[in-house]
Image (spheres, rainbow, N blue to C red):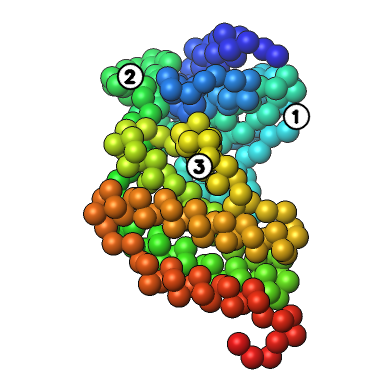
Amino acid sequence: MRTEKEMMDLIINTAQEDDRIRAVLMNGSRTNPNVKKDLFQDYDIVYIVKDIQSFTKDHSWVDLFGERVMMQMPEDKVTPPALNDGRFMYLMQFMDGNRIDLGLIPIEKKDELLIPDSLSILLLDKDGVLGAIPPSSDIDYHIKRPTEKEFDDVCNEFWWICMNISKGIWREELTYAMFMKEQINRNVLIRMVEWYIGVNTNFSISAGKLGKNFKDLLKKEEWEEFVSTYSDSNYKNIWQSMFNMCDYFRKVAVQVAKHLEFQYPYEDDKRVTEYLTKVKKLPEDSKIF
């Protein structure tokens, strides 16, 4: 596996030797002083370039970065549809384990497409067009304090979707039930847990993308409660994990509400929990509720 120095030298030297590349930025986890380094960290790189079409008309130029397992070019896709905003991305996984996510941004569109990000390091600026960039920090990714309306909406969404999950489990519609639980309500639960961590840290840290740092930020027993909200494909286990999810959501949401002086929707919670319990007890051939 090529070392970090070898990769950085390759990225910067490529830019220095190509007159079309005018500036280089790096962002992402490798610029975050609070993230422990590991071998799977991507190199998230942005090249500010002249004549972007001269790069994208023949993609073989990226071969210089090394032998790839495969490459993805989001702007060359129809599913999902491309953004078509002027940038071009090369997502490259290399045989030696390294990965570069390389974005090209036309220099004439830099002010429009180069969104300010606190996790940015300026590696090269041939013309001084980017100006000074503050030291890298993860402040842009700190958990944000919710408004009361945001809190109310998340609680409302969670309990509403629980009823959809129960319907899917009772019907034994596995894909529907698991989509509702693991795609919709999982994200809702993660948002509430982030707020719970936020109130306990004065909203001064990041929980990581999709809560990936929860294990380190929650107490051992809290993490185990969170883990118990996952399930396999057995319907009995899905039921149990959903009720575990309800219990854990209630626990953290009540604490968030108490800390921020919001009102937790106890009545919605009570009625929906009763509804879920009733659905669970319904015979599989029931014709009436």
State the image coordinates of residue 240 (x, y, percent, origin top left): 64, 60
Residue shown at 51% from the left, 75% from the top: 274
Residue 141 sits in which quadrant?
top left
Badge 2 crowding class, 10 Å Cα cut-off, few under 14, some 14 to 19, many 20 or more, is: few
Up-down relation of residue 125 to residue 199 (above or below): above
Q: CA distance from mark 3 to mark 1?
A: 39 Å
Looking at the rendered image, the disc whose residue lies closer to the viewer, 3 or 1, is 3
**Residue type highlighted by circle 1:** Val
State the image coordinates of residue 168 (x, y, percent, origin top left): 65, 71
| Sequence-wise first label, 3 or 2 | 2
Q: Disc 2 designates what residue?
A: 135
Say if residue 110 shows up in the picture. no
Residue 10 sits in which quadrant?
top right
The numbered dot on residue 32 is none
Say if residue 77 shows up in the picture. yes
User: Which of the two residues, 56 or 65, is positioned nearer the viewer here?
Assistant: 65
Badge 3 crowding class, 10 Å Cα cut-off, few under 14, some 14 to 19, many 20 or more, is: some
| Sequence-wise first label, 3 or 1 | 1
Q: Disc 3 designates what residue?
A: 222
Q: Disc 1 designates what residue?
A: 69
Badge 1 crowding class, 10 Å Cα cut-off, few under 14, some 14 to 19, many 20 or more, is: few
- Dot 2: element: loop
Residue shown at 40% from the left, 60% from the top: 154
State the image coordinates of residue 258 (x, y, percent, origin top left): 29, 52
Residue extending furthest toward the left: 261
